[in-house]
Image (cartoon, grey):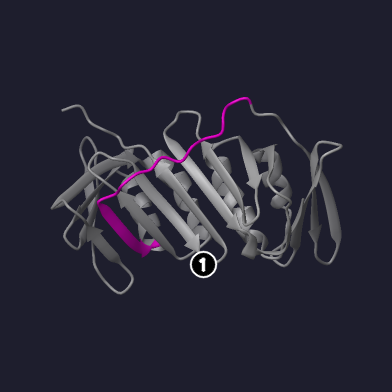
Amino acid sequence: MKVVLTEPRFLKDSVGVLSELVSDVRMKFDSDKLEIVAMDPANVAMIVLRLLSSSFVEYKVEGEEIISVNLSSLKQILGRARPSDSITLELDSEKNRLNIQLRGESVRKFNLGLIELQDTQQKIPELEFPAKINMSSVIFNEAVEDMDIISDSIGLIAEGEKLEIFAKGNTSDAKINIGKSEETSIIVEGEDKVKSKYSVEYLKKIIKGSKLCDNVSLKFGEDYPLQIEYRVTDRLQMFTILAPRVENK
């Protein structure tokens, strides 16, 4: 297996987000993509990365290759890549390691030892979301950071063509109203109003995916998981499924 990427940020920034939630991952290479599916230790968030073969200038994978790596170690190596560098990943099965080459004004070579993961491979759940929002990732980032001042949870309400993002603390509260526009689409199917709450701590980690693209897709339901997706056409898809915070009634 050998793959070469000339846009290092796609792998570098994706691994950065993954490392916020999990420490070790399986990397599955098949004929058309590199895929990582991982669940955080608390079983609160599942993150999925698909880096398409069209992202690479060279993509040689026979059948399917699955390797496991420590994300902290991989992140440190990829962090050394300059924006203009190319990244080559090549599997050395005999020595049980991933050879990583950063090529630019110089050629730097790293050998990352592979690890063994005991847990079974994660399955992506099939979910149906009544509320679907596409919006600027900058606006959503600001909303999460604003709500972090008030509370450790953030609420979302989708109704008609409006989205309300809110937080309530012991003595303070805040909300942001977002309407449909050229940059924002809001669709609510089958229900007049959809409301749910989520952890700000997790959201602050997940929104680091905004480095990948300018827009974010949000999908959720009533007291239901939230799917946050960043997508670059013909390059990559990264989404996180975040469990809701359900209050006792």
Camera sees residue 198:
yes
The amino acid sitting under disc 1 is Thr
For the residue pair 164 and 10, the one nearer the viewer reads as: 10
Is 146 positioned to the left or the right of 96 in the image?
A: left
Residue 137 in view (yes/no): no
In this rendering, is residue 19 above or below 5? above
Q: Is residue 195 magenta?
A: no
228 to the left or right of 58: left
Name which residue lies at 41% across and 43% down.
241
User: Where on the picture, by quarter, is residue 13?
Assistant: bottom right
Task: From the top left corner, tell me how far across and down residue 188 is, in percent.
Answer: 21, 56
Residue 30 point in image, percent of width and height: 65, 50
In the rendered view, tell whether residue 113 sits above or below residue 105. above
Quarter occupied by residue 229: bottom left
- Picture coordinates of residue 236, whole percent (x, y): 55, 59
Q: For mark 1, what is the residue?
A: 233
**On screen, 156 above or below 5?**
above
**How many marks can you see?**
1
Q: Nearer the viewer, residue 167 or 91?
A: 91
In the shown orientation, is residue 52 left or right of residue 202? Answer: right
Q: Furthest-left residue in view?
A: 192
Q: Name which residue lies at 51% across and 56% down.
A: 237
Residue in the image at 20% along x and 38% along y:
171
Q: Residues within 10 Å of mark 1 (few under 14, many from 20)?
A: few
State which region is magenta. 118-137
